[in-house]
Every structure is written in C-alpha cells, then in structure tokens.
Amino acid sequence: MSIAVALDHLGDEMARFGASAFVLTTSDDGRPHISHVVVTHDGGVLTCTVGRRSAENAATRAQIAVLWPPHEADGFSLIVDADAAVEGSQLRMTPTKAVLHRPVPQ
C-alpha cells in the first residue's frame, strides 16, 4: 500500500522519520549498494555524506533512492526517488517522487 507524498511536504515527513536513512545506489554490475546515512533537508534538496563506493555509483548512475524504515512492524516506510549530484563525499539529491509505503495487511 502506497500513499504519495507531495514533495513540498517532504520535510514534514522526514521530520517524523528522523535523519537516519539508507541511500540506495546501483553498482556497475547492476547490484544495489546500500549505505546508512544521516540526511538533511534544505530548500527542497537532500544532502548526506557517503563513502567512496556510493559516491562513485551516484556519479555514474545518478538515479538513487533514499529509504527511511518504519518505526513499527506494520508501519509505513518513507521512500524517496531522487537525482543525485556528487560533490566530494557529499550527495546532493533532488527528490523526484516520494511515497509512504507499507505491506498489504495479511
């Protein structure tokens, strides 16, 4: 079950979930690479510090995702698709889509 999040309300949702999230990039062979990061939101742009592999992946394949896991087992996750720009060890991410998502009840 997914609920769209308007990008102009993304900061409010991020405040509910906290700064701790996971950035998902794609490696050369198509495998996902996941990094635990601290994300900030300023003026519609998300920023985080990443390691070498995440930076290299995002520099080559800028379409990334950011995931905030749910606080409880049946709760919603926040998932943001974004276009990333690499500046040293920083990712500057411009969100393109955001959803609250949880499994369909059994």
Image: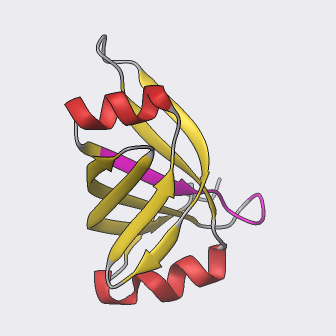
Residue placed most toward the observer, 85 or 72: 85
Where residue 58 appears, as percent x and y from the top left, is 30, 37
> In the image, is residue 100 part of the stretch drawn in magenta?
no
Q: Quadrant of residue 31?
A: top left
Residue placed most toward the observer, 15 or 54: 54
Q: Residue at x 45, y 77 (%)?
A: 41
> Does 37 appear above or below 41?
above
> Does 28 appear above or below 99?
above
Where residue 100 appears, as percent x and y from the top left, is 47, 69
Where residue 13 appears, as percent x and y from the top left, is 52, 82
Q: Residue at x 40, y 68 (%)?
A: 46
> In the image, is residue 70 part of the stretch drawn in magenta?
yes
> Does 27 appear above or below 72?
above
Report how many numbered discs are placed on residues in the image: 0
Highlighted range, magenta: 64-73
Q: Residue furthest top?
A: 29
Colouring rule applied to residues: secondary structure
Q: Residue at x 39, y 61 (%)?
A: 80
Where residue 47 appears, as percent x and y from the top left, is 43, 63
Q: Residue furthest front?
A: 88
Q: Residue furthest right?
A: 72
> Does 101 appear above or below 12?
above
Q: Quadrant of residue 96?
A: bottom left
Q: Quadrant of residue 89?
A: top left
